Image (cartoon, grey):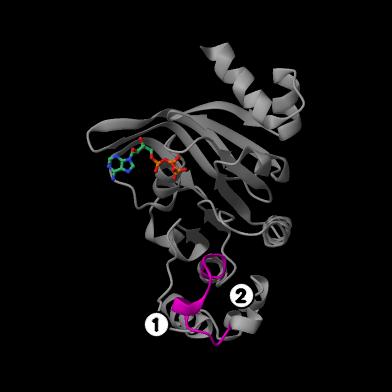
C-alpha cells in the first residue's frame, strides 16, 4: 500500500506532559482515514504534528517520505483546524482569492473550491455574516485550493446539518478516489462507518487500527462505538 504518512515511536510532550505515547501508524493515500476518539485524547495534537506545527515531537514522522514539517510539503497539504481560518471582513471569494495568491495557485481554483463546498450562493457575502457551518465550509474551501495530496481535517463536520455532513463525506471520498490521502478527526463514533479505515485513539495511544468491519469483527460486536467500549474494557 502507498502510505502518505508513517509514524513510529511518535511521542509528543505539551506543557511538560506527554500527550502522545509512542504511536506507530500509517495513513494510506487514496483512502479516507478516520482518527476517532474522545475529546482530549490527542487527535488535534497528532494532526498538528503531521502538518509540522507541533513542538515537542520525538520519534519518526514522515509525510510522503519527507520529515513532517518540511518546506517541500507545504503545497501538498491542506489543513483545517477546528477554528475557522478565514478573514471575517472578506467575502468567501475574496478569502479564497487571497489564499490562492499566497499559495500561487490559479484563479480558476477559487471557483472550483467555492463550488466544492457548496457556497456558490454565499460567495460574495462577508464571512462575518455566515453561519458557523458556512464558515467551516469556507475554511475547508481554502484547504482544497491547489488539490493537495493530503488533507488533514480536524473535526470538519461539527455543527453541520445531516444533509451537509453527507455531502462533505461524499466529497472526502471523491478526493480520496482521485488519489489524495484524507485524514479526518471526529469524536462522534457514528462518523466511523463513513471511513475506509479507522485509527481509534484514547489517552494518547491507539486502541485499534483497521477497517470498520475488521475492528467490529475483532471485538465481536456490530457497531464501532460498541467495539471501542469493548476494547477499552478488555484493556482495563
Ligand atoms: N497548549 C497546550 N499545552 C499543554 N497541553 C495541551 C495544550 N493543548 C492541548 N493540551 C493537552 O493535550 C491533550 C490532547 O489534546 P488535543 O487537543 O490533542 O485533544 P483532541 O483529541 O483533539 O480533543 P478535542 O476532540 O476536544 O479537540 C489534552 O490532554 C490537552 O489538555
Of marks 1 and 2, the one in the foreground: 1
The x and y percentages for residue 85 are: 42, 67
Q: Residues within 10 Å of mark 1 (few under 14, many from 20)?
A: few
Looking at the image, residue 96 sits to the left or right of residue 12; the answer is right
Give the magenta-colored segment's residue range.
123-135
Observer-nearest residue: 166 or 42? 166
The residue where tag 1 is placed is 89
Check residue 113 in the rendering and tell me which mark sits there, or answer none.
2
Q: Residue at x 61, y 26 (%)?
A: 228
Q: Residue at x 42, y 60 (%)?
A: 83
- Height in image: 103 above or below 221? below
The x and y percentages for residue 6 are: 51, 39
Q: Is residue 139 magenta?
A: no
Disc with the residue nearer the chain's start (1 vs 2): 1
Q: Residues within 10 Å of mark 2 (few under 14, many from 20)?
A: many
Observer-nearest residue: 214 or 74? 214
Amino acid at each position: 500500500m502507498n502510505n502518505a504518512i508513517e509514524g513510529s515511536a511518535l511521542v509528543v510532550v505539551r506543557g511538560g506532559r506527554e500527550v502522545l505515547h509512542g504511536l506507530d501508524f500509517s495513513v494510506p493515500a487514496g483512502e479516507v482515514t478516520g482518527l476517532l476518539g474522545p475529546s482530549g485524547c490527542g487527535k488535534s495534537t497528532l494532526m498538528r504534528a503531521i502538518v509540522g506545527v507541533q513542538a515537542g515531537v520525538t520519534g519518526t514522522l514522515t509525510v510522503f517520505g519527507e520529515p513532517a514539517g518540511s518546506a517541500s510539503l507545504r503545497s501538498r497539504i491542506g489543513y483545517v483546524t477546528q477554528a475557522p481560518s478565514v478573514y471575517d471582513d472578506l467575502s468567501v471569494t475574496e478569502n479564497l482569492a487571497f489564499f490562492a495568491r499566497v499559495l500561487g495557485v490559479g484563479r480558476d481554483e477559487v471557483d472550483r473550491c467555492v463550488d466544492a463546498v457548496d457556497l456558490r450562493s454565499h460567495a460574495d457575502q462577508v464571512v462575518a455574516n455566515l453561519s458557523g457551518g458556512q464558515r467551516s465550509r469556507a475554511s475547508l474551501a481554502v484547504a482544497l485550493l491547489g488539490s493537495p495530496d493530503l488533507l488533514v481535517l480536524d473535526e470538519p463536520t461539527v455543527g453541520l446539518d445531516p444533509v451537509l455532513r453527507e455531502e462533505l463525506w461524499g466529497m472526502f471520498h471523491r478526493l480520496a478516489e482521485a488519489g489524495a490521502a484524507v485524514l479526518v478527526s471526529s469524536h462522534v463514533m457514528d462518523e466511523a462507518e463513513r471511513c475506509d479505515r479507522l485509527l481509534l485513539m484514547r489517552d494518547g495511544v491507539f486502541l485499534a487500527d483497521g477497517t470498520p468491519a475488521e475492528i467490529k469483527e475483532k471485538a465481536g460486536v456490530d457497531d464501532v462505538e460498541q467495539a471501542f467500549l469493548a476494547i477499552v474494557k478488555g484493556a482495563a
